[in-house]
Amino acid sequence: MQFCLNYSSGKDSMLALDTLVNEGHQPVCLITSVNDEIDRSWFHGVPLNVLQAAADCLNLPLLTVPTNATTYEDAMVAALKQSQDYGATVAAFGDIDIEQNGDWDKQIAQRAGLTPVLPLWQQGRVSLVHRFLDRGYTAMIKTVSKASGIPDDFLGQPLNQNFLDYLAAHDLDLCGENGEYHTLVLMGRYLTIH
């Protein structure tokens, strides 16, 4: 199948891409929502030039979706519809197990006339983060939540066993699914961002 990927630049979206490609499916474009007030991706806050560099490394078109809190969903549906110009019949997402997120993914994909696919769904957070590392990817910790208590010393450091040990010792989610941290994938099987 040919798919567009809801791309955050983080470990989960990259692992979703990796999973689908290794199953023999073909990515046709990346879709990233951008906060139109700051020109950075929503939730992860990645600058446009970094997003474009990743898309270039992946040799995929990048559809950036300028939006705000009011227009977010409709703008994403429009971008998903646009992905069909590249041949997409499927919309892929990197969500793992939060029902509200999975339901939203399915809803906007179906509104756009695409089949939703969540290749990481219900696979277990611990196993997924280890699979990401075992596949040889390098990701940088780019944000940490103050509420989580994760020290700022981890910012800019790699997602590695040391960081995972810290999370486990403090009863924090290893995948950061509750917003404890976010990553930026820098290197791996499909990209190297300089």
Image (cartoon, grey):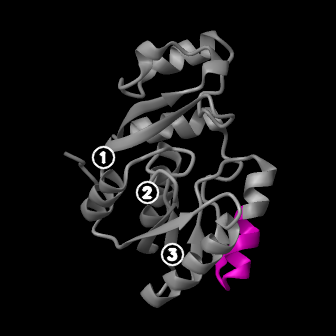
Which quadrant of the figure has residue 114?
bottom right
Q: Residue at x 24, y 49 (%)?
A: 192
Q: Residue at x 60, y 25 (%)?
A: 145
Q: Residue at x 36, y 26 (%)?
A: 156
Q: Which residue is mark 2?
A: 18
Q: State the separation of the CA atoms marked 3 and 2.
A: 12 Å
x, y percent for residue 128: 56, 40
- Circle 1 crowding by C-alpha within 10 Å: few under 14, some 14–19, many from 20: some
x, y percent for residue 8: 49, 53
Q: Which residue is mark 1?
A: 188
Quadrant in which the C terminus appears = top left
Depth check: give the residue in front, 34 or 191. Answer: 34
SS state under label 1? loop
- Circle 2 crowding by C-alpha within 10 Å: few under 14, some 14–19, many from 20: some
Q: Earlier in the sequence, mark 2 or mark 1?
A: 2
Q: Are marks 1 and 3 in contact (CB under 8 Å)?
A: no
Q: Which residue is mark 3?
A: 3
Q: State the separation of the CA atoms marked 1 and 3.
A: 20 Å
x, y percent for residue 191: 28, 53
- Kindly report the secondary structure that dominates the magenta region of the rendered protein: helix
Q: Which mark is residue 91?
A: none
Type of amino acid at the residue the image marks with label 3: Phe
For marks 3 and 2, give the one nearer the viewer: 3
The magenta-colored residue range is 105-115
Instruction: Identify the residue at the far left of this view.
Output: 194
Instruction: Report the number of numbered marks.
Output: 3
